[in-house]
Amino acid sequence: MAMTLRLTDQESEALRERARHEGRSMQEVARQAVREYVARQDRRAALDDVLATELPRYKDALDRLGQ
């Protein structure tokens, strides 16, 4: 799917410089950044789900440890 990504001049220059430094296209660098962002958010969501389930289970013990 095609999309247009509008960047500020600073963002565009930073992306251009990073791509040049890595010897890759700006598109490749941007796509990798998107993949990494999505993976990081997926991991965060999974951790939030586990914590929402497990923290209440250990609430009394955690409260005692905090005293």
Image: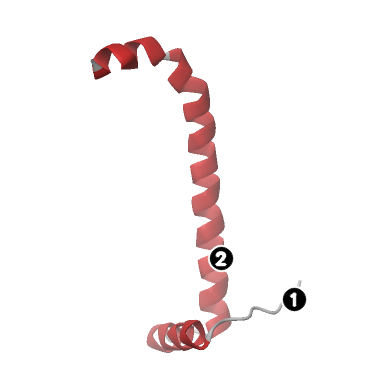
> Which quadrant is the C terminus positioned in?
top left
Residue closest to the far front: 67
Residue at position x 50%, y 35% from top?
Answer: 48
Q: How has the structure been colored for display?
A: secondary structure
Q: Estimate how packed mark 1 is, as few (under 14), some (14 to 19) or many (20 or more) residues with alpha carbons within 10 Å.
A: few
Comes first in the chain, label 1 or label 2: 1
Q: Callout 2, which amino acid?
A: Val
7 left or right, relative to 62: right
**Quarter where residue 45 is shown:** top right
Label 1 to label 2, Cα distance in Å? Answer: 14 Å
Residue at position x 53%, y 50% from top?
Answer: 41
Residue closest to the far right: 1
Q: Nearer the viewer, residue 62 or 31?
A: 62
Quick check: 38 above or below 16?
above
Q: Nearer the viewer, residue 51 or 66?
A: 66
Residue at position x 33%, y 11% from top?
Answer: 61
- Residue 5 percent location from the top left of the image: 64, 78
Which residue in the structure is indicated by mark 1? 2
Quick check: 45 above or below 22?
above
**Quarter where residue 14 is shown:** bottom left
Question: For the residue labelled by badge 2, is the local secondary structure a helix, a strand or a loop?
Answer: helix
Q: Callout 1, which amino acid?
A: Ala
Question: For the residue labelled by badge 1, is the local secondary structure a helix, a strand or a loop?
Answer: loop
- Residue 1 percent location from the top left of the image: 76, 71
Q: Estimate how packed mark 2 is, as few (under 14), some (14 to 19) or many (20 or more) residues with alpha carbons within 10 Å.
A: few
- Residue 9 percent location from the top left of the image: 51, 88
Which residue in the structure is indicated by mark 2? 34
5 left or right, relative to 36: right
